[in-house]
Image (cartoon, grey):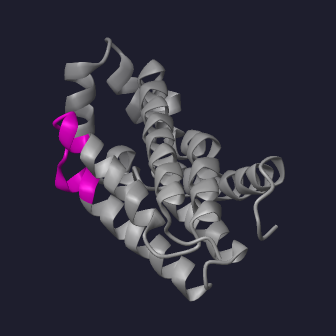
């Protein structure tokens, strides 16, 4: 079993940096067009799942998900965006991922499920489209080009949330499988 060693800790640090970079790319893509912001979870599934999966494959012990989640929270603190909408979902999702990995004894099925869960770590950022619409609209009017806010509201009806979540889960599972094959995960 790969546990915490100095070498694995350094590898995990690399995965945390890659995880934060991938999440940042997902955020930036959301600013390109409102459709990409609505489809945030799909983009996160494509870019984030493999990084989490590889981190979990490397560390078969408690704490890997905590490190990824902590990397996100520290990033939010560094950019001055650490608020309850962003941090509470990360904490809950990280705890859930750690719980699943522990229950599954750090084997591939638990790593798969935890990787899918961790792809939702920034749900608090984009979930506000559906749960805090007025605030999201106001922010989009202030921060984005003309017309972005209206387009965002138009492309995010209530039914889009479950559709995006389901698509995000399916794509995360596929990306985990692809990453496992490309990088020859130990338990695959």
In magenta, the rendered stretch is 76-87
| Residue 81 visible (yes or no) | no
Q: Please provide percent x and percent y for residue 20.
A: 42, 41
Residue at (55, 72) in percent of width and height: 3
Q: Please provide percent x and percent y for residue 34.
A: 45, 27
Tally the numbered discs.
Answer: 0
Q: From the viewer's perspective, is 132 left or right of 186? A: left
Residue at (74, 50) in percent of width and height: 179
The image shows residue 32, relative to residue 165, as above or below, that is above
Residue at (56, 55) in percent of width and height: 52
Q: From the viewer's perspective, is 185 left or right of 138? A: right
The image shows residue 2, relative to residue 172, as above or below, that is below
Quadrant in the rendering for residue 75: top left
Quadrant in the rendering for residue 78: top left
The image shows residue 173, relative to residue 187, as above or below, that is above
| Residue 108 visible (yes or no) | yes
Task: Look at the image and tell me in which quarter the C terminus lies.
Answer: bottom right
**Residue 77 magenta-highlighted:** yes
Depth check: give the residue in front, 26 or 165: 26
**Residue 150 magenta-highlighted:** no
Depth check: give the residue in front, 51 or 31: 51
Q: Please provide percent x and percent y for residue 65.
A: 45, 64
Residue at (44, 40) in percent of width and height: 17
Q: From the viewer's perspective, is 120 left or right of 113? A: left
């Amino acid at each position: 079993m790969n546990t915490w060693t100095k070498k694995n800790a350094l590898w995990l640090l690399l995965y945390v940096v890659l995880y934060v970079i991938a999440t940042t790319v997902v955020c930036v893509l959301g600013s390109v067009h409102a459709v990409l912001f609505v489809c945030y979870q799909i983009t996160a599934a494509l870019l984030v799942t493999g990084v989490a999966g590889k981190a979990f494959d490397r560390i078969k012990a408690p704490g890997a998900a905590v490190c990824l989640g902590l990397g996100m929270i520290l990033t939010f603190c560094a950019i001055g965006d650490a608020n309850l909408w962003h941090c509470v979902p990360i904490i809950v999702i990280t705890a859930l991922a750690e719980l699943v990995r522990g229950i599954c004894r750090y084997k591939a099925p638990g790593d798969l499920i935890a990787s899918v869960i961790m792809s939702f770590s920034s749900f608090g950022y984009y979930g506000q489209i559906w749960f805090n619409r007025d605030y999201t609209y106001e922010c989009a009017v202030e921060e984005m080009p003309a017309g972005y806010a209206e387009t965002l509201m138009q492309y995010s009806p209530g039914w889009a949330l479950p559709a995006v979540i389901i698509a995000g889960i399916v794509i995360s599972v596929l990306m985990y499988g692809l990453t496992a094959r490309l990088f020859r995960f130990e338990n695959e």
